[in-house]
Structures are given as C-alpha cells and as structure tokens.
Image (spheres, rainbow, N blue to C red):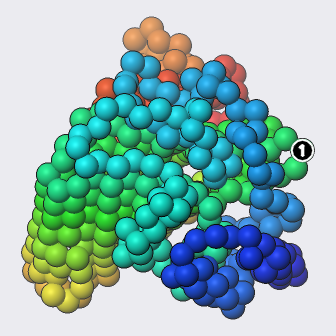
Amino acid sequence: MAVALDAKQTYVAEFASAETDRSGPSWLRGIRRSAIERFDALGFPTQRHEEWKFTNLAPLLRVPFKPPILGGPDGVVAEKLEPFAFGILKTTRLVFVNGRYAPRLSYLRPLPEGVRIASLAEVLRQDPGSLEKDLTRFARFQEDSFVALNTAFFIDGAYVDVPKNAVVDEPIHLVFVSTSRDRPTVAYPRNLIRLGAGSQATVIETYAGWAPEVTFTNAVTEIVAGPACVLEHYKIQRESEAAFHVATMAVDQDRNSSVTCHSMSFGGALVRNYVHTIFRAEGGSVALNGLFMPSGAQQSDHYTRIDHAAPACTSLELYRGILGGKSRGVFNGNIYVRKDAQKTVARQVNKNLLLSKEAFVDSTPGLEILADDVKCSHASTIGQLDENAVFYLRSRGIDEENARHILTYAFASDVVNQVKVAPIRIKLDQLILSRLPKGAEVGETL
C-alpha cells in the first residue's frame, strides 16, 4: 500500500509541475485535469480489487520511471526496426519512439482519397476540432487508473481516419518503440482509429523494445467502427522482457459493423491487456483472438469485456496461453448480454498449455445474460501436453524435443490460423517457434 501511495503522489506531482507545458485545445486541457483528479482519487489498484487480485503491481510501482528527454528518436535507426516488419508485406508505417512520432523512420504509401493517417499531436495542432467528438470518449478513465494516467499525460500517438466507403488495401502499420538509455522511461501512446460507413482497413500495432532495457508503456487505443465497416486489427507485443506494458483498447461498433482483433503477446516482465467492445446497434460482429507465451518469470494478463447492448449481434472469442518456466498468466473474459439484446450469439473459449510444473494460469471465463433468446457458451481448460500424443509421435521416428515442439505449435496454430494476412501469419509462426523450449529443458521440467 505504501509503495502504491508513493507512486501515486509522484505521478500527480509530475502532472502539476508540467501542466503549463502542455499545449492543446481548452476542451482537452479540461479532460486532462479531470483525468489526473480521478487518478488521484482512485490511486493504483491493489490485489484487493477484484480485477487485480491475480496481479501484483509492486514491481512496476517501485521503478522510478521518467518521461523521455525531448528530442530525436533516441538512437533508434531504421535497421533496428527490420525484425519487426513482415517480410514482403507493403504497409504504410508510422513509427513512434517513446510515445513521440519519428517522421524519418516512417513512410506513407499512396492512400485512397480522403484517408488520413497522421501523428495525433499534429492533428491536435492543426485541426483539434476534428478530434473533439471522439478522442478520450470511449476509453473511460473514471474507473481505470491507467486510462486516467494515459489521458492526463499522453502527448502523441496515431490517428487513422478512413472515410465512408473507402477501402485501404494495404495494411497500416503503427510501430511503438520503447527504449531507455540512462534511466527507465515511460511512454503514453494514444491512438484513435475511425472507420466510416462501409469502409475497410487493416491496422497493425507493434510494440517493440530491446533487452535488457526497462521501460513502461501505458497505451490506449480507441476504435470507432461505423455502420457496415470492416476492420482487421492486430496487436503484437514484443517489448523487452524487462519491460512493463499496460494497454487498453475500447471498440465502439455501429450497425452491421465487423471487427476482428488479434492480440499476440510475447515480451514484457508484466503485461496487462484490456479489451472492451460494445455493440451500439444491431447486426454487428466481433472476433477476439489472443495468444500469449510468457516464459521465465514473465506475467501476461488478458481481460476482455464484450457488451451486447443491441440485438442480433455475434461475438466469438478464442484465447490460448502457452506458459513455460515460472511464468504466470491470467485470462478474465466477460460477455455481458443486456435485457433487450435478443438474438445474441456469443462464444468464448480459453485454453492454456503449461510447459513446466512451475508455470501457472488463472482462467475466469464469464457470461452475464439478461436476455432470454440467445445462444451463448464459454469454456476453459488448463493442462500439459498429452504424453500419449508425445509417445505416438516418437513411435513414428520423431525425437522427443521435436514431438513436443510439434504438439505445442499445433496448440498455438488454432489462433494463428485466424490471421488472414499471410506475411503476418508467417512472422507469428517464426516467433512461436523461437520461443519453444530447447533441448533437455523440456524433459526436465515436465
């Protein structure tokens, strides 16, 4: 409790000391002040809070994170970003280093008429009125300390605006690099993605970093999905395994919109992803697919809430965890079907594979149904590799290490196969294979 209180006071004091340096429209300055006041009232959550009972924030709160020193991209060069690209895939790329736009690392490819992809800070300077309706309106800070901190402190992020009936064929790649040279740094990326009626786009968010740098990313993405739009969204978290990562994504869906969100988490000492979607009108669909692969002493937490506030909507949720070493994982999924949301179809599945005896996962799927004409289900499993399956593969001439690799990869492939863009799927295959246990370690821990 003392650690949380000290950390809270540090952040509040930092806001007060730098508030006059933050430019921006008056409506945003007012929201920032409300956010820091709410954070001051809430403080950091502890394990006494229901949604945080499996997560100890003390390691995060003990580190004296500081904002990065203003200036260039802090030593990041284009060559260092190559491992985070997707082979031959052509994308428009916006790069942010420690939460600030890096134009010399970014490039825009030809875009359909009316499509705007830019630094959020630039749009706030040039056309702040275009953001007032949506920015900070969907990821609510009233009950979330980390969203409140992001709202108070964010400087930059990505702005993606796809107008009515526009189709963006090539993916939009948003790269958020966290780096620290002389001191642990904190960044607050804020992203706003808007799709007009009948539009289509693919957006990739990559969070990148390098060992052994200690950084803290507190990210918020707000998605406004217009009527009958189609969005394919990917989030790939590959920060340093000494990094801390807390991210919130809020998705607001209009009539007949279709949104698919893929969340892939590999890096980070402590990672927490929260996804909140809501159907505002009938006929919408959402698919949430997730894969997390902590190892060593990593912890990877995933909280989701799908709010069926309108009738005749469909949600499909598939999360899989593969945990090795002494790692920890959390999956907490909630599907909420309101009284008038008849004809709802919702399915939630979480499966977890433990690669060692010391790995542990808490899985809490949940349904809260107030309507009576629905088709809803949920399931959760936790277990180790089937030794009979291992024996079967070995009897076919495959050694034990490769047999276990094949079965582990097959477990992950159900999620990866949901990825429609082939170069992204290939990259994920490579990442999964690179994180599989090597040699005798597998036999010793199982």
| Image-based side of 45 in relation to 376, left or right | right
| Image-based side of 288 in relation to 445, left or right | left
Can you name the residue that lies furthest to the front here? 126
Asked whether 20 or 229 is in front, the reply is 20
Can you name the residue that lies furthest to the top here? 397
Residue 261 visible in this rendered orientation of the protein: no
Residue at the spot 44% in from the left edge and 39% down from the top edge: 173
- Image quadrant where residue 213 sits: top right
Quadrant where the C terminus is found in the figure:
top right
| Image-based side of 388 in relation to 282, left or right | right
Residue at the spot 82% in from the left edge and 59% down from the top edge: 66
User: Where residue 251 sits in the image (x, y, percent)?
Assistant: 35, 66
Secondary structure at badge 1 equals loop
- Image quadrant where residue 188 sits: bottom right
- Image quadrant where residue 63 sits: bottom right
Residue at the spot 57% in from the left edge and 20% down from the top edge: 401
Residue at the spot 31% in from the left edge and 32% down from the top edge: 110
User: Where residue 209 sits in the image (x, y, percent)?
Assistant: 67, 39
Residue at which label 1 appears: 182
| Image-based side of 375 in relation to 159, left or right | left
Asked whether 72 or 221 is in front, the reply is 72
Asked whether 17 or 211 is in front, the reply is 17
